Image: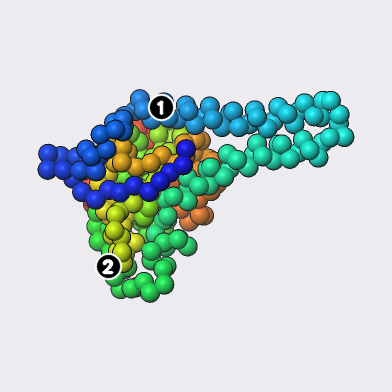
Amino acid sequence: MDAAPATARGAAAGGGLAEASRLHWREDASERTLRRDGRRWTAWTAWIGGVFVVPGALLIAIEPLTFPAAAICFAHAWAVPWIQARRGARQVVPIGSERSAARRAGADGGAEGVALGLLGDLVGHAERDLLRTSGLALQRGELGAWLVGEQGAILVRSRGRRADCWCVRVAETGELPAGDRVAHLLLALREDELGFAKVANLGFSGATWRVRRQLPGRARPALDAARRAARENRCGVNHSG
């Protein structure tokens, strides 16, 4: 389940994202499809664990001296899900992180500052402070609590227990500042949350703690805030304050 880049640029005249209406072959996103995809990821993770753990346990049962070979099996059972969670977490790209547009060679510091200020005007006071410290924009929606970065978003749902990592980015970014990239995605999410989930590509779905371990330290408080929002079931439209 690899995550290819997707785009979110605007809304169709009749409402909703134009990109979503063009993807007629994709199933519309809903709570049902999210639960189904989450179960698939859980089954896949369990299958990976069984594929490597069971042979390792059998080796030890047959001959304890084969423990080094069994340890390799156990290491694979841990590493493969870890790599998938890391890939999902890296898709988000917080503002100011090592892969951020704000840190690219030749980035205009003045333009980056202006874009970040304009982005701050789109969110509430608490979300603005969280954006400044973590580089991620928190948005409450019908599906759960979203954290939006430059190239993706994390959806925290199931009352904070599960995190879905989505790959989605603005088309033709060029020299677009980091704050503007997040702002475009944030506005697209507000315009059509289900369409946003349809356009984006799901790169990982699993326990929130697994995603948290793979995020940069400064971005982890944002995930904690999204978990609290999901647990409190305060997922409504967020107005700037």
The residue that label 2 is drawn on is 114
Observer-side mark, 1 or 2, equals 1
Q: Is residue 138 left or right of residue 66?
A: left
In primary-sequence order, the first of circles 1 and 2 is: 1
Q: Position of residue 233 (x, y in %)?
A: 35, 32
Question: Measuring 47% from the left and 38% from the top, which residue is drawn there?
Answer: 1
> 10 Å neighbourhood of mark 2: few (<14), some, or many (≥20)?
some
In the foreground, 222 or 109: 109
Q: Position of residue 27 (x, y in %)?
A: 31, 30
Q: Position of residue 106 (x, y in %)?
A: 38, 74
The residue that label 1 is drawn on is 35
Count of numbered circles on the image: 2
Q: Report the Cα–Cα distance between label 1 and label 2.
A: 39 Å
Q: Position of residue 53 (x, y in %)?
A: 69, 30
Question: Measuring 71% from the left and 27% from the top, which residue is drawn there?
Answer: 54
- The vertical placement of 216 against 175, above or below, is above
Question: Measuring 21% from the left and 38% from the top, which residue is drawn there?
Answer: 21
Residue type at mark 1?
Arg
Which colour scheme appears in the figure? rainbow
Residue type at mark 2?
Val
In the foreground, 115 or 18: 18
Tell me the quarter of the picture where residue 38 sits. top left
> 10 Å neighbourhood of mark 1: few (<14), some, or many (≥20)?
some
Tell me the quarter of the picture where residue 32 sits. top left
Q: Does the image show residue 231? A: no
- The vertical placement of 235 against 39, above or below, is below
| Cβ atoms at labels 1 and 2 below 8 Å apart | no
